[in-house]
Image (cartoon, rainbow, N blue to C red):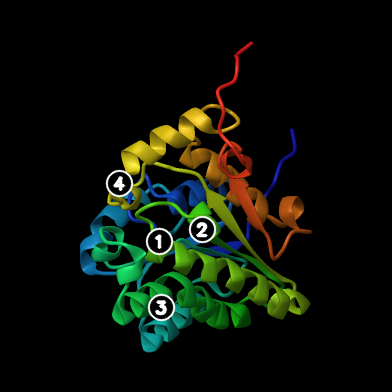
């Protein structure tokens, strides 16, 4: 079996809220392969759960940061540099839009809704890459999470879908800018996973069932499958030649053009 040893590698994982988080599913194989990890969180209320979740990892570093605050991001990456001495991997699993945007038609999106969703969900990737790149002195890899609503209409996803489209475009431009430095930037477009964030979307239960019954594999994906692909994209021996890409982990759902009954067997 092909073995990947990440001993001596360092990563920052942003967006772990609990054990169901996709970011946590990506962090686990990195840690198991020997990478030392730092985790950022926003708000004191999230720290206790993160402390418990990461207790068995090798010297995890927990740091508070607000991605909408440039000074806070400056402090975050200064601390990452001090604690880890450099950076090889960055996992960006951050997205937010006001709750009202999931409940009313996209037509009624307000200017403030747009600004907040774009700032947190798309610009934050640019902001963290600006600060991570100087720490990636020997090259590195950046990974973010997106969703099919970036390119197709998913009812109720609304403003977040537009923000994910901006995020995916940002991946390509960042990959172009950081390529000469040996830093790769990619995204995973994950299918429906039962995370706390996903469950807050109106109609998610129906979306989840629909995707599972109509995907090419006739099932839903797991967070662990997304984590495995994330590991492959981040780890240089596996994903070293891939950058500027959005890879789908959705059991083939994104590639279906028309849904018709088909005979089994």
Q: Where residue 199 is drawn, which disc sits there?
A: 4
* Nearest to the observer: residue 43 or residue 199: 199
Dot 4: what SS?
helix
Task: Please say whether residue 66 is visible from this viewpoint.
Answer: no
Dot 1: what SS?
loop
Give the residue drawn at x 30%, y 48%: 196
Give the residue drawn at x 50%, y 36%: 221
x then y, percent, for residue 233:
66, 54
Compute the Cα span from label 1 to label 4.
16 Å
In front: mark 1 or mark 2? 2
The reply to whether discs 3 and 2 touch (Cβ–Cβ < 8 Å) is no
* Nearest to the observer: residue 51 or residue 198: 198
Label 1 CA crowd tier, 10 Å (few <14, some 14–19, many 20+):
some
Label 3 CA crowd tier, 10 Å (few <14, some 14–19, many 20+):
many
Quadrant position of residue 255:
top right
Q: Where residue 15 is drawn, which disc sits there?
A: 1
Compute the Cα span from label 4 to label 3.
22 Å
x then y, percent, for residue 180:
78, 78
């Amino acid at each position: 079996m092909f073995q990947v040893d990440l001993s001596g590698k360092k990563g920052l994982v942003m967006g772990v809220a609990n054990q169901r988080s996709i970011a946590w599913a990506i962090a686990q194989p990195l840690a198991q392969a020997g990478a030392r990890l730092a985790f950022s969180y926003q708000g004191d209320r999230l720290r206790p759960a993160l402390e418990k979740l990461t207790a068995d990892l090798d010297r995890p570093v927990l740091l508070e940061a607000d991605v909408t605050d440039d000074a806070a991001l400056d402090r975050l990456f200064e601390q990452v540099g001090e604690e880890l001495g450099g950076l090889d991997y960055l996992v960006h699993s951050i997205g937010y839009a006001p709750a009202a945007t999931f409940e009313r038609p996209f037509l009624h999106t307000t200017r403030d809704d747009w600004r907040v969703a774009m700032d947190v969900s798309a610009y934050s990737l640019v902001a963290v890459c600006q600060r991570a790149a100087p720490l990636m002195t020997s090259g590195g890899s950046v990974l973010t999470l997106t969703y099919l609503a970036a390119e197709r209409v998913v009812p109720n996803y609304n403003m977040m879908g537009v923000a994910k489209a901006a995020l995916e475009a940002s991946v390509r431009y960042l990959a172009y800018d950081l390529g000469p430095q040996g830093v790769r930037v990619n995204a995973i477009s994950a299918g429906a996973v039962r995370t706390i964030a996903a469950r807050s979307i109106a109609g998610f239960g129906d979306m989840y069932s629909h995707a599972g019954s109509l995907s090419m594999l006739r099932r839903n994906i797991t967070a662990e499958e997304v984590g495995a692909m994330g590991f492959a994209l981040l780890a240089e021996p596996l994903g070293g030649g891939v950058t500027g890409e959005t890879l789908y982990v959705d059991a083939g759902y994104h590639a279906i053009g028309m849904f018709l009954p088909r005979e089994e067997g």
